[in-house]
Amino acid sequence: MAAPWDVIVVGGGNAGFCAAHSARQEGAQVLVLEKAPRQWAGGNSYFTAGAMRTSHGGLADLKDLLDPSAQDRFPLTDLDPYTDDDFLDDLVRVTRGRTDTDLARILVGESRATMDWLRDLSLRFELMYHRQAYEVDGRHRFWGGLAVGVVGGGKGMIEQHLAAAERAGVHVRFDAPVTRLATAPDGTVQGVVLVDGEVLESRAVVLAAGGFEANPQMRAAHLGPGWDLALVRGTPYNTGDGIRLALDAGAQPYGHWSGCHAVAWDSGAHPTGDRELTNQLTRGGYPFGIMVNTDGHRFVDEGADFRNYTYAKYGAEILRQPGGTAVQIFDAKAARLLRPEEYASKNVTSVASGCMRGLARELGIDEDQLASTVEEFNASITGGPFDPTVKDGSRTEGITPPKSNWAQPLETPPYTAYPVTCGITFTFGGLRVDADARVLDTRGLPVPGLHAAGELVGGLFYFNYPGGSGLTAGSVFGRRAGHSAAALAAGRAR
Ligand SMILES: Cc1cc2nc3c(=O)[nH]c(=O)nc-3n(C[C@H](O)[C@H](O)[C@H](O)COP(=O)(O)OP(=O)(O)OC[C@H]3O[C@@H](n4cnc5c(N)ncnc54)[C@H](O)[C@@H]3O)c2cc1C
């Protein structure tokens, strides 16, 4: 029987849509199968800020990429170039040298061209003044290697992907959970099987079904004890299905299976993502205050690096604290540095007080201990001057853990505290792919007909992650996966 589809894409998030667009551009008949119902479209990608890390040559170089309607502040904007070397160095540094350099070089080297490709597909980009720049001396200064985002964030991104797919004639089917691959006796992938037993045949399959972050059992099994209790920041549908069905077909597990991206997250949040608040439940302002556990002790260097290079690993540090919770504390002068969407939107869990002891009482933390932690912190500060756009060297001396940058005394009431817990974003372990995003088996050979992109690919991220890399990785490898799947489909007999 002739296969009705050239390429089936499993999962309708950013990586899946990039694979679908790319395969369709090669002339393939493409079907995207999405487990979630229509009202949960977009997977984790919907929940994002839409931030995308790309190498670039500075503002002038980015102009063509950015939406013309969002360029009015350019004359007052300072944005240094971010080269391929900078991007690669950041990846290598935060992953402690473990990133798969073949994959990392592809990600970095194709990041900018892939953004242009997305723009040509009608995705719209802007500079993220509200998230990645501070105003200093009347100028908007970008920091932390991340500047570009999709207009409308993750919600805008999915809307734009869906519109592009519809224009191009990509078919999308919701409520279609794939449970297994259909394979020939020689292992060649020939399609997929849905949960109700329906078989859909295709010449190639691209898996883009996310990680296992929304599966408490897999989290506990792979990330370790306590991880079943983490809150999930995004979609409840990423339960590791794509990874498991590929492993069942002989794929090779790869990457940091006990590692994940997890952040400081509002302790009052739901167990899984909120479609309205999405990313607003993140609490990423800790470089401008302190984080203490419920015993009143600090436990991380809040200023070790720009937020973009620490936030993804600090969720795990919070989970390790008593009760898996912590509190971020700021004084009044830090308020202007906190992202309003994270700290001043509705449903923010917080308490405020005119004095530190009052705050401790409100929080149920030992008063003497919190007061002494803050006194010790304030007395240890040296260096400066304070500048949020550079690693300013305003630091502590003689306390453990130190705070290496942006250390300012907590002395200007009122003091506000934000209780946080660990919010898991996505898991780092997954499948092994080659440069063409073909899934490799345990011998290192391609599983015929099987491709993969996005969160379920392992090998790029270990321990930590440079902010904004996930969407770019999904785009770069999604585009490659779609291309190679379509090429394979074209070569297979119709
Ligand atoms: C709150 C939040 C904020 C974030 N902010 C950013 C950011 O600003 N920038 C950035 O780069 N990254 C960000 N990330 C990370 C980012 O979401 C991921 O890196 C990226 O979206 C992954 O894309 P994906 O297509 O692989 O997965 P997803 O977008 O999650 O798509 C996977 C899809 O597969 C579907 N699926 C699962 N199982 C099956 C099955 N059996 N059959 C069919 N379909 C299935 C799921 O329902 C889902 O729709 C954020 C994540 C969260 C949760």
Image (tube, helix red, strand yellow):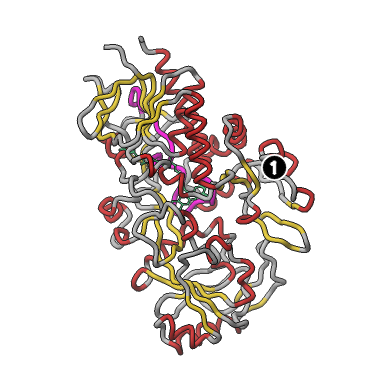
Residue 47 lies left or right of residue 392; in this view the side is: left
- State the residue lying farthest toward the bottom: 368
Q: Quadrant of residue 119?
A: top right
Can you say which quadrant of the picture contains the C terminus? top left
Which residue: 60% across, 56% down? 131
Is 395 situated left or right of 431 in this image?
right
Quadrant for the N terminus, please. Answer: top left
Image: 427 above or below 407: above
Mark 1 CB near ligand 1 (8 Å cut)? no
Q: Quadrant of residue 388?
A: bottom right
Which residue is at a point 79% across and 49% down the rendered structure image?
A: 75
Q: Which residues are magenta?
A: 445-469
Q: Is residue 416 above or below residue 336?
A: below
* Residue 428 appears in the figure: yes
Which quadrant contains ligand 1? top left
Query: How far across and down, in percent of the image, does residue 140 sit?
Result: 72, 56
Can residue 53 be seen in the rendering of this structure? Answer: no
In this view, the residue in front, 180 or 314, is 180
Say whether residue 450 is magenta.
yes
Mark count: 1
* Label 1: element kind: helix
Residue 317 within the magenta-colored segment of the rendering: no
Q: Magenta-highlighted stretch: main secondary structure? A: loop
Q: Residues within 10 Å of mark 1 (few under 14, many from 20)?
A: few
| Residue nearest the observer in this picture, 115 or 306 | 115
Depth check, front residue: 246 or 181: 181
Q: Which amino acid does the dot numbered 1 rest on?
A: Ser
Q: Residue furthest top?
A: 493
**Whole-percent x and y of residue 257?**
35, 48
Provide the residue designation for mark 1.
Answer: 69
Tell me where residue 483 appears, x and y as whole percent. 48, 24
